[in-house]
Image: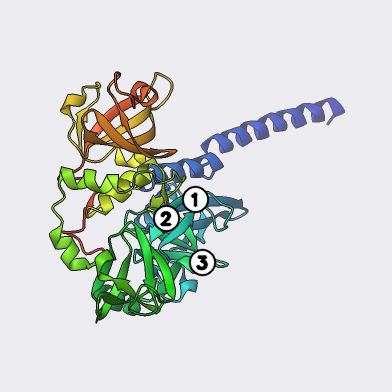
């Protein structure tokens, strides 16, 4: 064979190899983009909001296929994910950590043990404050990193709290805590004491909505126990047995307005959801909680609850307790952005947390007219006495 013929054969072989290689890549079901597409599909279906669901999965390519890593608290989502990979004939090794983590050794539930525990976006004190948990709040615990616990609150919000803010419990200890009698603190702020008098050593500060185990009575004080076993005394003028409080709730428009005004002047705190400081949605959440309702954490979540009352600035349709939402309307190229929320109190006024908790007006002639929020108004929703997926009525569900 001549050198010329050898060159021709080599050239033809290269063309064939190139053709086969291109076809194999284009039809390869193990292609990275196929796996990522499946991850996205499952996440969109089962965990579209990372604030309330965990599906942090990644697939690393190896010689033998893929290694699935990450964690999730959604068994159905993980099962659907691996099923789709199998159906697509994608080879994989499942190393996904299902939460709660086995390293917790059964202590997968807990109770907040501070008047207001700061919950953060990452397991470090310098991380963003995303919400708060108040004393007595039950949480699910998913895993631990160093001295931090990843927890989920009754409104399904997921965040990190350090060891000082939560008391981890196994199922038996948690069931015992939940079955006991409770006391709810109703004054905006105050203290518990080592003895049954207001001059005794302070055990801790307390804020409205704090819940403790009720042990008994002594004179003008209730004897209480904290989730971590500390005992203390709380003035009867500042607290009510929890069951008595729940049964007494009328959840009226007037009650919502009355409670909201007890928080006037409270400082704005990004991530705050307690009488120590509130952001806009933390304020509306706190007002409703002190009236026996748990509502979603963020304004962008609250806006999906209840029924539509107005979306055209016809404020005559509103009643006290309705939530007003503000932000940026959707355009042809951008989605709607819900940035702020306040609560209607009547007389063309709403109360909200911006700088501090204060009252603003939609009346252009009023001294407290809020032109800025008037111009970015989106719509109003009514959640009082309405049934909605994200609303929990403490009269109907034993959260505590």
Q: Nearer the viewer, residue 93 or 295?
A: 295
Which numbered disc, 3 or 1, marks the residue closer to the eye?
Answer: 1
- Badge 3 is on which residue? 144
On-image quarter of the N terminus = top right
Marks 2/1 in contact by CB < 8 Å: the verdict is yes
Q: Could you tell me which secondary element the residue under label 3 belongs to?
A: strand
Q: CA distance from mark 3 to mark 1?
A: 18 Å
- Percent of width and height locating residue 202: 43, 72
Residue farthest toward the right in the current orientation of the protein: 3
Q: Which mark is residue 132?
A: 2
Q: Which mark is residue 129?
A: 1
On-image quarter of the C terminus = bottom left
Against 151, is 235 above or below? below
Q: Quarter of the image holding residue 345?
A: top left
Circle 1 Cα neighbour tier, 10 Å, few/some/many (<14 / 14–19 / ≥20)? some
- Percent of width and height locating residue 86: 43, 52
Q: Could you tell me which secondary element the residue under label 2 belongs to?
A: strand
Residue at the image position 68 percent from the left and 29 percent from the top: 15
Say left or right for 360 vs 96: left
- Percent of width and height locating residue 234: 31, 72
Residue 280 visible in this rendered orientation of the protein = yes
């Amino acid at each position: 064979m001549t050198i010329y013929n050898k060159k021709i054969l080599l050239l033809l072989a290269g063309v064939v190899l190139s053709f086969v290689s291109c076809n194999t890549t284009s039809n390869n079901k193990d292609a990275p983009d196929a796996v990522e597409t499946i991850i996205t599909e499952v996440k969109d279906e089962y965990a579209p909001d990372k604030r309330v669901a965990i599906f942090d999965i990644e697939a690393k390519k190896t010689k033998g296929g893929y290694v699935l890593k990450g964690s999730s608290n959604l068994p159905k989502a993980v099962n659907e994910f691996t099923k789709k990979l199998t159906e697509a004939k994608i080879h994989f090794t499942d190393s996904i950590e299902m939460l709660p983590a086995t390293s917790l050794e059964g202590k997968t539930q807990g109770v907040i043990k501070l008047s207001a525990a700061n919950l953060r976006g990452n397991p470090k004190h310098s991380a963003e404050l995303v919400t708060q948990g108040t004393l007595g709040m039950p949480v699910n615990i998913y895993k631990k990193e160093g001295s931090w616990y990843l927890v989920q609150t009754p409104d399904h919000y997921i965040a990190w709290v350090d060891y000082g803010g939560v008391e981890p419990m196994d199922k038996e200890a948690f069931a015992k805590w939940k079955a006991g009698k409770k006391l709810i603190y109703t004054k905006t702020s105050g203290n518990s004491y080592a003895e049954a008098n207001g001059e005794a050593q302070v055990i801790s500060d307390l804020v409205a909505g704090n819940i403790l185990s009720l042990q008994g009575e002594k004179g003008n004080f209730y004897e209480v126990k904290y989730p971590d076993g500390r005992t203390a005394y709380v003035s009867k003028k500042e607290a009510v047995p929890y069951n008595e409080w729940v049964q007494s709730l009328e959840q009226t428009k007037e009650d919502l307005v009355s409670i909201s005004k007890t928080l006037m002047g409270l400082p704005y705190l990004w991530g705050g959801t307690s009488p120590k400081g509130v952001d806009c949605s933390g304020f509306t959440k706190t007002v409703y909680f002190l009236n026996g309702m748990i509502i979603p954490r963020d304004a962008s979540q609250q806006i999906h609850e209840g029924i539509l009352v107005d979306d055209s600035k016809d404020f005559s349709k509103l009643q006290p307790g309705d939530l007003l939402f503000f932000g940026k309307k959707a355009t042809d190229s951008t989605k709607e952005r819900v940035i702020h929320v306040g609560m209607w109190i009547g007389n063309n006024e709403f109360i909200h947390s911006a700088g501090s908790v204060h009252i603003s007006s939609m009346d252009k002639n009023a001294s407290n007219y809020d032109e800025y929020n008037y111009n970015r108004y989106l719509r109003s929703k009514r959640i009082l006495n309405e049934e909605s997926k994200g609303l929990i009525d403490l009269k109907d569900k034993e959260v505590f």
